Image: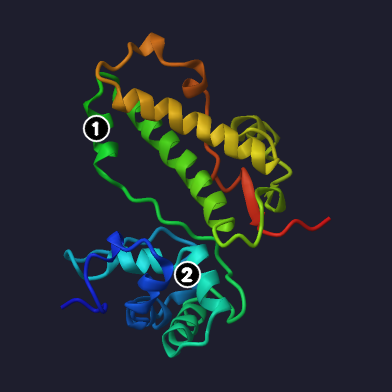
Amino acid sequence: MNPFLRRATEYIRDTTAFLAITSPEPIKTFIANHRRVNDLLDFPVRVIGSPGTGKTMMASLVEFRLIESILQDQSSQGNRALAAALSAARFADGEKPLVAAIRIPMESEYREFWELPYEPAVKTKLVLSLIQARAILGLIRTLTANKQREIDDIRFITRPEAEAQLIQIGGDESKEIRERAREVETLVYNIGASLLPPALSDIPDEVQKPYQASRHESIQSVRHLRTE
């Protein structure tokens, strides 16, 4: 049984159209009413279900840009129900989002990296760097999606002991962090998408450098509004 109002919602790009066919019941059932709801955002969680059961819709619904849109427009009964479910699930407090969540589709291109003629450790590093870069780009994109803030309004707060990681991620300014993530994504993607993969010795130095932007000891938090 499909618990949502329509299937294949991953093909719907318009926010208004997406929310019009979205039900709050899965968020309430699987998250808000979970006996360990307070722990779900602190530990890795895997959601398993057959096609059409709403995994993609539920992941899309908790993205920051959608939560923000829902909270700002509660004129419809549907949005009010979604806002209540998201607040009960600890993704919002009724007025603003509490979690800057994004969704990264794990599509077939990631699988292609395992066909590359490198050692497993090298292939793993390439995939993880690509995911990390896309996580940072997705985070910045979702924070600026509703045009209420520019990238200069976003401030990354790093831990005091993470000075070494600042070089990895491009510094502590949002534009520099975005450019570093773009660089890593482009270089790694070109390796996986190339007709003939480069020899290990020909992989650019920028790809071989450490890049772990979202490790807990690196970035402590993100404030979507700069405060001086």
Question: Furthest residue to the bottom?
Answer: 77
Q: Residue at x 54, y 44 (%)?
A: 215
Q: Is residue 130 left or right of residue 75?
A: left
Q: Is residue 173 left or right of residue 8?
A: right
Q: Is residue 74 left or right of residue 77?
A: right
* Residue 107: percent from left, percent from top: 27, 45
* Residue 185: percent from left, percent from top: 45, 33
Secondary element at image label 1? helix
**Badge number at residue 112:** 1
**Badge number at residue 39:** 2
* Residue 57: percent from left, percent from top: 32, 67
Tell me the quadrant of the picture where the N terminus can be found. bottom left
In which quarter of the view is residue 46 placed?
bottom left
In which quarter of the view is residue 18 placed?
bottom left
Q: Is residue 90 visible?
A: yes
Secondary element at image label 2? helix
Q: Residue at x 46, y 43 (%)?
A: 134
Q: Residue at x 39, y 83 (%)?
A: 33
Of the residues under marks 1 and 2, which one precedes in the sequence?
2
In the figure, 29 relative to 206: above or below?
below
Question: Which three-letter amino acid code belongs to the residue tagged 2?
Answer: Asp
* Residue 84: percent from left, percent from top: 49, 85
In which quarter of the view is residue 175 placed?
top right
Q: CA distance from mark 1 to mark 2?
A: 34 Å
Question: Which three-letter amino acid code belongs to the residue tagged 1?
Answer: Glu
